[in-house]
Image: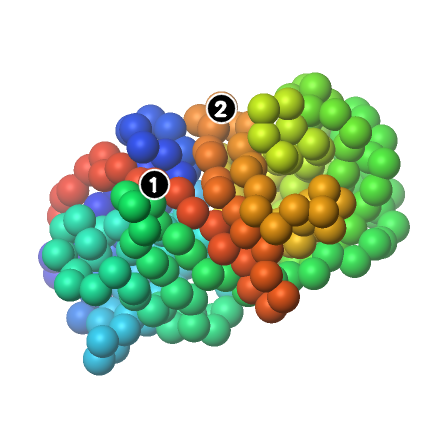
Amino acid sequence: MELEIYQIDAFTSEVFRGNPACVVPLSKWLNDEIMIKIAKENNVSETAFLIKKNNDFCLRWFTPNVEMDLCGHATLATAHYLKQHQNHPNDEISFHTKSGILKSKFINGSIQLELPLREPKKTIIPPNLANAVNYKPIEVLRARDFILVYDNQLKIENIKINRFEFDKINIDPGGVAFTSPGKYCDFVSRFFTPQSSIFEDSVTGSSHCSLIPYWSRKLNKKKLKSIQLSERTGILECEAHKNHILISGKAKTYLKGKIFI
């Protein structure tokens, strides 16, 4: 079997920045075990598999370990692939996913994604998570992911995690977002996943489904700018709505190739 593969850096306008995702177009779904093996071989945080469905597309996301319920950066990479490499005629594309229908729109050189809003609720920090980090958060919330809120960006930059304790946390399939007000933007974040082969995610669109409504209320702003402070860094233009969020960014193709199975 021969498959096309594209590796695309999402939420950036230049290669080696943002978050890399692989996009693999299919004519029919492969066995789940094979898709996880492909994702593991690719060794990026997410591999997106898509199938054309009438005028829309069915989309699934796999980490090197599990299938995910939602992934923002690999969805943005898929939209980029369809426009850049398949000359998709429309500026709006709909994806059928485990999280419902996700919409992408091309606006002034950027790709805007409409993702579900996941309202974070205040909670108590689990003991293992409290023991795993070097700074005590001022607030702890959870939707799919835990969100640890801090009072300044310096703590997000210098967060230290005890991996042994952190990996005892059971958050399937989510992770932990660390966030604070930003020096040069509205808010910053970093994102880590316990028991994952890729510990820190470079840019996490799905965590913004909860970060955006939180910071929108906190800052009393509908439109916000977010920077994810990973080594590769990612920039997201964000917008809060009643039942969904919008995130926008650019993407750049790094690699086009073939998979032989």
> In what element is the residue under mark 2?
loop
> In what element is the residue under mark 1?
loop
Q: Relative to the observer, which residue lies in front, 26 or 10?
A: 10
Q: Relative to the observer, which residue lies in front, 98 or 189?
A: 189
Which residue position is annotated with label 1?
250
Residue at image coords 29%, 29%: 15
Residue 249 lies, in percent from the top left, at: 39, 43
Which residue position is annotated with label 2?
231
> What kind of residue is marked 2?
Glu
Residue at image coords 34%, 41%: 250
> What kind of residue is marked 1?
Lys
Residue 261 lies, in percent from the top left, at: 18, 55
Corner quadrant of residue 240: bottom right
Question: In the image, which disc is placed on residue 16?
Answer: none
Disc on the earlier residue, 1 or 2: 2
**Could you tell me which quadrant the N terminus lies in?**
bottom left
> On the picture, is 54 further left or further right than 234?
left
Q: Is residue 83 above or below residue 60?
A: above
Category of crowding for the residue at label 2, using alpha-carbon neighbours closer than 10 angstroms: few (below 14), some (14–19), many (at least 20): few
Q: Is residue 104 above or below residue 141?
A: below
Task: Give the Cα separation between the discs numbered 1 and 2.
Answer: 18 Å
Q: Is residue 236 above or below residue 222?
A: above
